[in-house]
Image (cartoon, grey):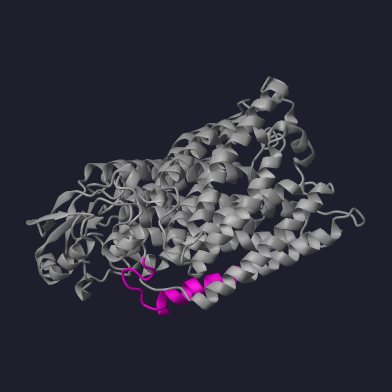
Amino acid sequence: MATLAAPAIYTPAEKRESTLYSWLATTDHKRIALLYLFTAMAFFLWGGGEAELLRWQLRAPNQHFLSAEMYNQIFTMHGTTMIFLAIMPLSAAFFNLLVPLQIGARDVAFPRLNAFSYWVYLLGGLLITVPILFNSAPDAGWFGYAPLTTAAYSPGIHIDFWVIGLQILGISSLATGFNFVTTIINLRAPGMNLMRMPLFTWAAFCTQFLIILAFPVITVALVFLLFDRFFGTNFYTIAQGADPLLWQHLFWIFGHPEVYILVLPAFGLVSEVLPAFSRKPLFGYPVMVYSLILIAFLGFGVWAHHMFAVGMGPIADSVFGITTMLIAIPTGVKIFNWIFTLWGGSIRFTTAAMFAIGLVAMFTIGGISGIMHSSPPADLQQTDSYFVVAHFHYVLFGGSLMGLFAGIYYYYPKFTGRMLNETLGKWHFWLNFIGSNLAFFPMHFSGLNGMPRRIYTYDAGQGWDIFNAMSTTGAIIVGAASLIFAYNMVMSRRRGAIAGNDPWGGPTLEWSIPSPPPVYNYAHIPLVTSRYPMWDLKSPRLTAEVPHSARADQAVRVQVGGRDEGEIRLGAQPESIDDKIVSQAAERVATAEELGIAIPYSTSKPFFAALGIAVMFSGLLVSRLGSAVLEFGLIFGGAALLVGSLYWWLTSPLEPEVAHH
């Protein structure tokens, strides 16, 4: 249970500016969350459009809708866009919105670094996306296998955009990782120990460590490739003695943890949605926490199951096969715990709940085919076939995106203060669920029938025609569902039903404050002695069976407006606590009007620092045009802008402004 301040009340004077500069200079984690949400959704629609083009090319044999060159560019950018520009940033939107609210903090640890990470993401995403409009996009696959991506085999500027764009995006991811690890460790409210943190915050915590440990590896791999392409080094030149598997090891040491970077936030969101709509505490909370940690740990020990076909030998194949089977254990634990959370609950089939249940079903299918890949002999038959394409789309679309959609429908009121339309939401779910299964399930059969990945076209009579026609039809249905969702988001942003503090009857701290939250989050930092503070206050019967270690029955002192209001024994008489809070509400509002809370100034310094990075790296791209003056002008101009912005940023204090409420 938590002693909560009376909800802060918005006054007209507190309405936030909506000018362009106010968004450019914001350091409010909730506004940055909105920027991430809508930017990532725009990239999602862009990447989805690329997928539609690919599927239309493959709808029937011997199609010439796309040229081979354009197919390779769209194929590469579809994977890159969905992974680095859509799913990861959608997760970052939830990190920004929820982590401070769920742990009872007023802000993230580094507000300006948080803004910097968004602007780096946006500029890096534009740098890597825009070239496709000029027929110059990356064209070697989102995995960028070297030496095929070295200048000898991929001349021109195409791969340069990919190498430099991913380096820029890596800076954004690492900034986010360090920021939220620090926030979760240092800014938890009193009483919010680790085993009282909501499951989404735990998922975010584990994800940040994956980012911090995995992204330096891909950074090294990309630096090697950048030096080979621009400065004539030989890190990947086989004729000069380079290891032909060096890129694969470096890429997949990053690439497999990246799968869990994409999936764990969705797991955390589902672990918030299912208890709320089954009206039951999450089944086996401690085991769910340990399974998150174990998935993150084992995720670094399975990378070479992507390389069973390269001839590593029986010992290496056996080791990585066994570790791949082991990681199925904590993943399976989560599936069963979600099912047992639903079992016997009073389930409300809202759109959010339906997407969460859809994740459980579709990720299970993807997980079963993943276990099949853990056997080296089976994997030798399936590798580089459409069977693998089916597998990772079930994991990433059926897992990551279904969970993120559940989170958006559940938390959109907290993002914006308005509800998404439930009727449109259910249309979105059913079209999405039917279309995705129709698109991806036939790929298992076309793959088992020998259809290779990355294929541009194919002849008739190979047994693939009907499966590709089904997949294209499913992709069109998913596209229609995505347009409905986009319309719902945009329409509801302005005209959706007004949401109260707690439209769903949620159990965690974020539902105790207004929607959207005030700039300072909490008028008074809550004292937390429960995993389910809102249910303890409003529906104590729901947490009657939660262990006392999670619902401490102890005396604490309640403070209102800085004054000691006496002692309450939490867990003994929750109704009397609720009465005490209600009786003091008027006094608390009066006190809040006199109270000033320091918050960071809005500042454009992070934007200009991010712009300096983008301009500096663009100088390398210009070197391909042969203009030394422009090249050095951009490199040194961007470096000067970056250094100047950082100096301006770091030498100016984080001056507070006072928000009166």
Relative height, residue 82 to residue 515 (above, below): above
Based on the picture, tell me whether residue 484 belongs to the magenta stretch: yes
Q: Is residue 328 left or right of residue 383?
A: left
Query: Where residue 17 appears, x then y in whole percent?
Result: 28, 69
Q: Is residue 26 left or right of residue 468?
A: left
- The residue lying toward the viewer, choosing from 532 and 243, is 532
Give the residue drawn at x 28%, y 63%: 512
Residue 250, quarter of the rendered image: top right
Relative height, residue 644 to residue 339 (above, below): above
Relative height, residue 225 to residue 123 (above, below): above
Based on the picture, tell me whether residue 421 belongs to the magenta stretch: no
> Does residue 441 appear in this view?
yes
Query: Where residue 559 appears, x then y in whole percent?
Result: 12, 56
Residue farthest along the right direction in this orientation? 461
Q: Is residue 430 left or right of residue 499?
A: right
Give the residue drawn at x 67%, y 41%: 371
Residue 58, quarter of the rendered image: bottom right
Query: Where residue 311 appears, x then y in whole percent?
Result: 74, 26
Q: Which residues are magenta?
A: 482-505
Residue farthest along the top direction in this orientation? 241
Quadrant of the image containing the C terminus: bottom left
- The residue lying toward the viewer, choosing from 535 and 54, is 535
- The residue lying toward the viewer, choosing from 276 and 299, is 276
- The residue lying toward the viewer, choosing from 477 and 395, is 395
Quadrant of the image containing the N terminus: bottom left
Give the residue drawn at x 71%, y 34%: 152
Residue 317, quarter of the rendered image: top right
> Does residue 26 appear in this view?
no
